[in-house]
Image (cartoon, rainbow, N blue to C red):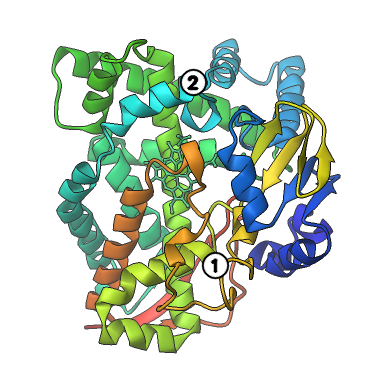
Amino acid sequence: MKELMALDPAAVRCPYPYFAKMRADSPVTWIDELGCFAVVRYQDILEVVRDTERFSSRMPTGPKAAADTFAVLQQLVSDGGASIEALAAGMGMASVSVLLSADPPSHDEQRKLVSRAFTPRRVRDLEPRIREIAEDLVEGFVARGHCEFISEFAVGLPLRVIAESLGVPPEDMAMFKRWSDDLTAVIGNHQMSADQLRRMLSAFVEFFAYFTERIVERRAAPSEDLISAIVYSAAEGERPLSDPEMLAMFAQFLVAGNETTTKLLGSLLLLLLEQPELLAALRADSSKIPQLVEETLRLESPVQGLFRVANVDTEVGGVSVRAGSSLWVIYASGNRDAEEFTCPDVADLERANSRSHLAFGNGVHYCLGAALARAEARIGLEVILERLDDLALDGEADLLYERSYVLHGLRQLPITFRRR
Ligand code: HEM
């Protein structure tokens, strides 16, 4: 585990043996580097995330990330290295609790309002557009016979889908991508630099200014996009959502929805390249694609785990946990728990309980964008398999993974192929 905490490249790429050892030896164990307990067994994780009275979501990325951010922030203040506006935006943001970082009852009220904007029907209606975007991205490199799959496909697909849903026009796309990068860089990276934090604060300021204008525009003239749906359903609740709450939600869609789906697409393709029998099975029967998506979510969970804070003195997996202690619920470990999944390390296209994985969490915080992410992964892979043949890794270079213990996936995946 020390290796993973030090973000050693091999451990970041494959942390599963550490999790397996913890499940066997000490399923609820203190991690000094993070200042929290790690919870690694499937049933213990469920117990924690389903009990919102005993466990709060108020610090979902963990105490270490919060403390480190604060320390770098103090440094920036004393150096005069960030504008007052940027600091205020960062502080303001930290004090707004929405969805991911909110607890019932306010979480449930917010969730009821935004769920109306994330209905299965809305996702179904988006499917043709998801396919068009995927085909357009493939068109950009198909003639070349090689590409860097992450930057040329896996980043663009979810980014364009969420940007269009939020009503961001193509000319603002590069800016939108930069905000996504700068806001995500701090997750699970406890070696964050002052420069990264400064960029994150600036991204907040720009993001909020941009979307404040969009909210005003939609109030005056609603359209079909997600912003309009949220602006209007937000006004209908018993306690309508405030503008800062809506802005924090849009930021959450950006951070929670983009990188995660990018990572899923990268892991899906790598799994197919490393296990040609899976590729052959999908070529023979493309209706198995959704099952491979579930198995990839289980085996290479893009969000390896998130954090809860104990509200009371309590016990988890037989270990005493004092009120105020943080717990890292490692979904990626629960997903390979042999008590829950037979042959847990194998991608099995016939697994009966493949959708029981915890990659989208569980309980009231279950991923709001799960249906959208599943649709993007399925359609993205369908288009890749329809358009490209003889898929192979390009060269023997080491594959580069995200330097994070929370987000998991490739930063680059060079591939070769033949046009179909
Ligand atoms: C493969 C892609 C994705 C993965 C692996 C993923 C993973 C997760 C996980 C594990 C949670 C639970 C958080 C917790 O336990 O505290 C979550 C919540 C959430 N996700 Fe996703 N997510 C993905 C895609 C998306 C997309 C596309 C969106 C939206 C556009 C999204 C928006 C959210 C939001 C808003 C929450 C908070 C829900 C709440 O607290 O009620 N996610 N996601």
Q: How many marks?
A: 2
Asked if the residue at tag 2 contacts the one at tag 1, i.e. Cβ–Cβ closer than 8 Å, the answer is: no
Tell me the quarter of the picture where residue 51 sits.
Answer: top right
* Amino acid type assigned to the residue bearing label 1 in the image: Leu
The foreground one among 307 and 406 is 307
Residue located beneath label 2 in the image:
105
How far apart marks 1 and 2 lie (CA) works out to 33 Å
For numbered disc 1, what is the local secondary structure?
helix
Near-viewer residue (196 or 237): 237
Question: Does residue 357 lie above or below 100 as drawn?
Answer: below
In the image, is 234 to the left or to the right of 359? Answer: left
Above/below status of 175 relative to 387 = above
Residue type at mark 2: give it.
Pro
Quadrant showing the N terminus: bottom right
Please state, as top left, top right, bottom left or bottom right, where the C terminus lies in the image: bottom left
Residue at the location (38% across, 21% down)?
246
Quarter of the render that holds ligand 1: top left
In the shown orientation, is residue 127 left or right of residue 263?
left
Specify whether residue 405 is in view: no
Return the x and y of residue 60 as percentages of the image width and height: 61, 35
Above or below 281: residue 258: above
Q: Earlier in the sequence, mark 1 or mark 2?
A: 2
The residue located at (51%, 64%) in the rendering is: 298
Residue at (70% x, 55% y) in the render: 40
Q: In the image, 107: left or right of 112?
A: right
Q: Position of residue 303 (x, y in %)?
A: 55, 51
Q: Secondary structure at mark 2?
A: loop
Q: Is 333 drawn above or below residue 55 in the view shown?
A: below
Kindly tell me whether residue 119 is visible in this rendering. Answer: yes
Question: What is the crowding at mark 2: few (fewer than 14 residues within 10 Å), some, or many (at least 20)?
Answer: few
Residue 299, label in figure? 1
Residue drawn 26% across the image and 77% down it: 286
